[in-house]
Amino acid sequence: MKKFKDLRVILILIGIVFMFIFPVVFNDQYLIWVFSIALIYSVYASSWDLLSGYTGKENFGHAAFIAIGGYMVGFISKAFPIPVYLSLPISAIVSAIFGVVIGIPTLRLKGPYFALATLAVASIFEKLTISMSQYTGGEEGMIGITYLTDDPNKSYYFLLIFAVLAVYTMFKISRSNFGLILKALKSDEDACRAIGINTTFYKVSAFALSASFAGMAGTLVAHNFGYIGPDIVYPLSLNSMIMAVVGGIGGIVPAALGGFFLTFASELLRDFGDYNQIIYTLLLIFSALFLPNGVFNGLSNFLKPKGLKTSTEVRGGK
């Protein structure tokens, strides 16, 4: 079992090394740009999984925190150009505060009611950003936001390092005692409450952490495009869930991989014009039918030694 885990770690490290040498070897500016976007959304997908994958509270309005991070940069940019090293920590704190404010009332709801409540939150944010056009630019969005750097290659490396650190941080959180308690809440919240665990604290904390990383992803979206608007923000609520499910829900790294590869695939499929959505849908159906536990776990099944069960199979009692 240890050798199998070591193999997965080695494959992930090989992937990271490839990402570092990719711009040097290929020097394709379009692919570098696509990879840059995919790196941001890998963090976004992982941030969704940190709450929803580990607590079972499916957040259908996660894009609201992308909006908070992105529009916050837009508001500040109206006054002065804000560098990313200032906007990231500010967006993390502001998004976490919003996460607490939104989480305290909504996390009292169970099942589909929580999902509907978070979807309503995202809808309210969308209506506000469109109606308050004098501040947000309305449907046209906000332009003139400071770019990450003046060099696409430097921006790519910045995003790569940030994505690796962010995903690793969320992974360590998920493997800590905090993460174990979140898993316990997902399995049986009433039992956790009965043994004295402050379930509200852990759920709200998970919501705040999830919102914080999503807010930073939103900030990077704004800096990367030099623009933030409803057209690139609010469709991401459903996408974050799809990314995590395709990658492998309940796992930070699989969710990140799902976010990366689905973003990469959707960008490349733009060349197919009107057929891109059909092809994208077929890819999702293929994943659901043949890789129901996610692409990452599907690859794990393929690579594992014969007779060895993956963690997903063990949890399912197979």
Image (tube, helix red, strand yellow):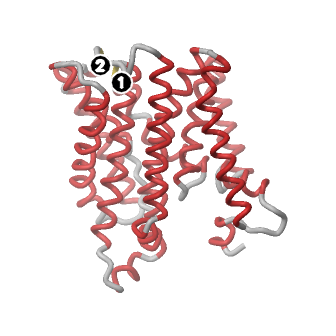
Nearer to us in this view, 23 or 91: 23
User: Within 10 Å of the Cα at label 2, are there few (<14), some (14-19), or many (20+) other Cα atoms?
Assistant: many
List x then y, in percent, for residue 1.
72, 67
> Which amino acid type corresponds to the residue marked 2 in the rendered image?
Ile
Identify the residue at image location x=55%, y=24%: 34
Quadrant of the rendered structure where residue 86 is? top left
List x then y, in percent, for residue 180.
46, 70
> Residue placed farthest to the right in the image?
306
62 sits to left or right of 86: right
- Residue under label 1, please give it: 223
- Residue under label 2, please give it: 145
Eyeballing the image, is 48 above or below 308? above
202 sits to left or right of 112: left
Contact, CB < 8 Å: mark 1 with mark 2? Answer: yes
Q: Secondary structure at mark 2?
A: loop
> Which amino acid type corresponds to the residue marked 1 in the rendered image?
His
User: Within 10 Å of the Cα at label 1, are there few (<14), some (14-19), or many (20+) other Cα atoms?
Assistant: many
